[in-house]
Amino acid sequence: DQQVKQNSPSLSVQEGRISILNCDYTNSMFDYFLWYKKYPAEGPTFLISISSIKDKNEDGRFTVFLNKSAKHLSLHIVPSQPGDSAVYFCAASADYGGATNKLIFGTGTLLAVQP
Amino acid sequence: GAGVSQSPSNKVTEKGKDVELRCDPISGHTALYWYRQSLGQGLEFLIYFQGNSAPDKSGLPSDRFSAERTGGSVSTLTIQRTQQEDSAVYLCASSPGTGSWTQYFGPGTRLLVL
């Protein structure tokens, strides 16, 4: 069963506009959420995270929103730039910093920012 | 500083052969993880090492998979009697383990089992 779901396999956005990437989860025990960005032939790179005690975290052009009641989080990129073109993975943990600390990943969304 | 490194970057092997994949974590990081990404899938957790604690092996798909971490640093993931369904990108990550649990990933090893 897919505990973390990214239902949009791809997204195309014009440069300068907002990119919104969505993620849904099913496990109510998840208490920490992360977004990773991956370029081809490279490992994922940490982008931004949010704890379940918050509903928003912002870092420059990147903002993550968490709606716990809907078990939904989203990543907003404003303004989008061509260099943002990559695969974005949503990840969640039920034991962040704990005995396990393992991340459960979604299947990724390929973002293409058109110049 | 140097990031997580993995070797080999690519590995082609024949079904039934054993393979070893190596991971060098970021110096000083006490936590080390192995994941794999099959085609069209997300990253799948395999195993987690933290300091001298017993590893969390809950993600290993079968007893053909094993991993070691020597001296609290380098880790080797071994797949015995490889099968075609083992073909995937195997990713290693490390995190400081204290104060910060952000996982930093290596570039991965692309394994193809013919």
Image (cartoon, rainbow, N blue to C red):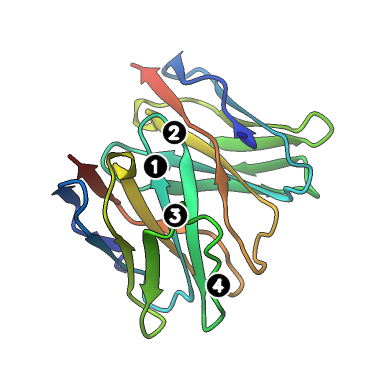
* Front-most of residues A100 and A6: A100
Q: Is residue B43 above or below residue B47?
A: above
Same subunit under labels 3 and 2?
Answer: yes
Residue A86 is situated, as x and y percent measured from the top left of the image, at 38, 31
* Residue occupying image coordinates x 48% and y 46%: B44
Q: Is residue A47 above or below residue A24?
A: below
Type of residue at label 4?
A: Gly
| SS under mark 2 | loop
State the CA–CA distance, disc 2 to disc 4.
27 Å
Type of residue at label 1?
A: Gln
Which circle, 3 or 2, is nearer the viewer?
3
* Residue occupying image coordinates x 48% and y 31%: A108
State the CA–CA distance, disc 2 to disc 1.
6 Å
Q: Can you identify the residue that label 2 sits on?
A: B41
Q: Can you identify the residue that label 4 sits on?
A: B97
Type of residue at label 2?
A: Gln
B70 relative to B41 in the view: left or right:
left
State the CA–CA distance, disc 3 to disc 1.
16 Å
| SS under mark 4 | loop
Instruction: Examine the rendering and report whether any part of residue B88 can be seen.
Output: no
* Residue occupying image coordinates x 42% and y 25%: A110
Type of residue at label 3?
A: Ser
Image quarter in which the N terminus of chain B is found: bottom left
Residue A63 is situated, as x and y percent measured from the top left of the image, at 62, 36
> Mark number for residue A88?
none
Q: Can you identify the residue that label 3 sits on?
A: B62
Marks 3,2: beta carbons within 8 A = no
